[in-house]
Image (tube, rainbow, N blue to C red):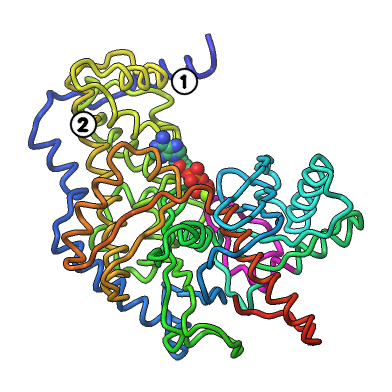
Amino acid sequence: MSVADVQNRQWRKFDPYIVPVDKNAVENILRPLDLSDDDYHTVMQSMLDQMERGLGAATNDTAPIKMYPTYVRAVPDGTESGEFLALDLGGTNFRVLLVTLKGQEVKMDSKIFLIPQHIMLGSGKHLFDHIAECIYRFVKEHNLMERKLPLGFTFSFPCRQKGLARAMLTTWTKGFKCEGVEGHDIVALLHEAITRRGDLNVECLAVINDTVGALMSCAHTDRKCAVGIILGTGSNACYIEKLEKVEMAEGNEPGPPEMLINTEWGAFGDDGSLDFITTDFDRQVDKHSINAGKQRYEKFISGMYMGEIVRLALEKLRKNGLLFGGEGSYHMATRGRFYTKYVSEVESDDTDSFPMTKQIFQELEIETVTDQDCRLVRHVCALVSRRAAFLSSAGVACILNKMKRPEVTVAVDGSLYRFHPHFHDLMMEKTRVLAPGIRYKFMLSEDGSGKGAALVAAVANRILAEQKAKGNPETSSAV
Ligand code: ADP
Ligand code: MG
């Protein structure tokens, strides 16, 4: 018998809460997850206030939504060409990519490298040495050692940028916590690691966020694309703002009168403004996260947390004898063990016999799962997903109403949006209600983090070459 089996048995023996199923009791537990349109409107108003505060130089300091200038001033025009390296850090996988641009043609070759937990939670030096090592292995494998390649870095953590290739990490999120990086320029740290090795001929020309990558990548084919959002491990958004509103940007580079803003909307609510919709489940998720009190909006929405919210709701129902006849398991009592992908599987399941749902709970070692249990589990998943999708819609609608463009394409990246069976439809439905009169569509960004970084690096490289030709070797910060 395994350790888990032993723990399972002891655990079941002590379960004290077996009572008959009661619809009202179920409702009482789940009602806080069901929000009204009034609630979503309140959320939007409060998000708009915080965004305006984030943009203003006098108010940015105390604003939870930081609205970071990205120094990206224009979307691609389709003439970008050449070979570029791209890095994608800030998600589940770390990737190095070789991107070949030639008009609308984009070729990508990429390799995933693992970032082990001890590096995610270790020193910054160790992290950047590891990244440089991965670049080296990739470059070597692709026989690129002899060439000097421009690199675009998709770094999906909140950064205060001072230019296209100067980005100070504000705070780690999503499970990363490397010492000695917060407050530092990550491009400098990367270049130091590259210099320490001495065998790499690579220069990082631009740092972007994955939201910017998604937007740029979709804008390459759709000129109406003006918003990018991420619904993956975390959640974030960027959009095109009028330059005159971007009070926090430094310098005065020539270029179009617009700039992409990386909202970092995940931090919305960190001042308590979302407390009115926060349930006990959300409070527990936050309390046990490595960034308690932070990224409150993100924790309602994204893949890193949704499964856990569902698990906590299921556990509460179970402890009240309303699910699985009160039977628990070691797995179901384990934090993070109910993955967000299960939520997608449950909601995609056949509603007559629930084969996938039963399979999931078999893996989680719940022995008796009735069809009624499966229906209730599905209901819980649907409630949590709906709230997440509608809150994301509230964010998108807030930006669309603020931009006032008659027609906008919203680029979306992230596995939650990509793989959840209803997320797209739910977002379409609620955005229509919350942003009436605006024509919009959601467009899945295909590999925005790689292609977007290469596109921004391409434009930066072109400007750099133009300046060198003019005899001014200064690095431009405007794309
Ligand atoms: P990242 O945001 O880290 O770049 P992804 O976009 O792949 O990476 O998002 C990863 C997140 O997506 C994980 O938190 C995971 O829980 C969630 N996820 C993965 N597969 C699914 C799925 N089938 N349905 C819903 N969420 C999923
Ligand atoms: Mg990603």
Quarter of the view holding residue 26: top left
**The C terminus sits in image quarter:** bottom right
Which residue is at 67% across, 56% downward?
Answer: 178
Residue 430, above or below 241: above
Which residue is at 33% across, 13% downward?
Answer: 367
* Left or right: 261 in relation to 461: left
Can the viewer see residue 58 in this picture?
yes
Secondary structure of the residue carrying numbered label 2 = loop
Locate residue 444, reporting x and y percent. 41, 49
Magenta: main secondary structure? loop
Residue 323, above or below 56: above
Locate residue 176, reporting x and y percent. 60, 53
Taking the magenta stretch, the answer to whether it contains residue 34 is: no
> 405 or 102: nearer the eye?
102
Q: How many residues crowd mark 2 within 10 Å: few (<14), some (14–19), many (20+)?
A: many
Taking the magenta stretch, the answer to whether it contains residue 184 is: yes
Dot 2 corresponds to which residue?
320
> 103 or 44: nearer the eye?
103
Secondary structure of the residue carrying numbered label 1 = helix
Which residue is at 29% across, 73% downward?
Answer: 405
* Left or right: 196 in relation to 345: right
* Left or right: 449 in relation to 445: right
Can the viewer see residue 184 in this picture?
no
Tell me the number on the disc at residue 7.
Answer: 1
The magenta stretch is: 165-187
> 396 or 172: nearer the eye?
396
Q: Amino acid at mark 1?
A: Gln
Q: Is mark 2 within 8 Å of ligand 1?
A: no
Locate residue 190, reporting x and y percent. 76, 62
Q: Amino acid at mark 2?
A: Asn
